[in-house]
Amino acid sequence: MDMAAVNRSVALLVLMAEVVLLQLCQAAEYKVGDSAGWTSIGNLDYKQWAATKTFKVGDVIHFEYNPKFHNVMQVTHAMYRACNASAPLATFTTGNDSITITTQGHHLFICGTPGHCQAGQKVDINVLRTPVAAPAPSPSGKPSMAPAPSPNSASSLKAPAGIDHPKLGLAMAAFVVFVLGFA
């Protein structure tokens, strides 16, 4: 393999890594219940709250609550429907719990305090399958880039701590240009 082919292969690998990093950088953080948080007071409709969001793998679901009165239990579908807190998959009790979504499908949470789930303190975080879409062809026959989707709400979208996204993208692009310059 000649040096130009090696350089193109390295550039392609770097470009693929940049796509993966950009997808991770687009992860959102959602505070369950927005400003009200995780509570049984105020008739908050968590089903409606979740219906206004588009959850993705990598998103962080943040529960803020008073740990003297509430907790967060991840449960099965049957336990969720019955408000059964007897054998949760996971229990969180700090009052400030962040859970990273790592798989597609339903992620079901209830408050295990007696009566709270029955009063509506439960949420279904449903991560839909999101196929990778190919760029739409443009009238000129050359591929065009589709615009990035907009976040569900500015108040619930935060960048992961410690990553300066614009500089990371710029650095990766500069590296690809540098490598391609030697091709």
Image (tube, grey):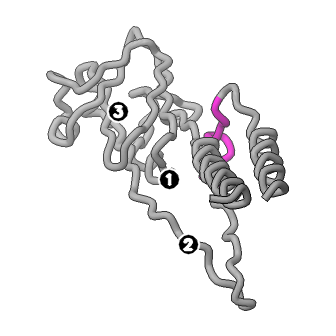
Q: Mark 3 and mark 2 in contact (Cβ < 8 Å)?
A: no
Figure quadrant of the N terminus: bottom right
In the rendered image, the residue lying farthest to the front is 2
Please name the residue that numbered disc 2 is placed on: 134
Q: CA distance from mark 1 to mark 3?
A: 20 Å
Picture layout, residue 144 above or below residue 157: below
Closer to us: 135 or 94: 135
Magenta span: chief secondary structure: loop
Image-based side of 71 in relation to 30, left or right: left
Please name the residue that numbered disc 1 is placed on: 54
Q: Amino acid at mark 2?
A: Ala
Marks 1 and 3, the one that precedes in the sequence: 1
Q: Residue at x 31, y 46 (%)?
A: 106
Q: CA distance from mark 2 to mark 3?
A: 40 Å
Q: Is residue 97 visible?
A: yes
Give the residues in magenta.
150-160
Q: Residue at x 78, y 51 (%)?
A: 179
- In front: mark 2 or mark 3? 2
Q: Residue at x 39, y 28 (%)?
A: 40
Q: Quadrant of residue 129?
A: bottom left
Closer to us: 98 or 165: 165
Q: Amino acid at mark 1?
A: Thr
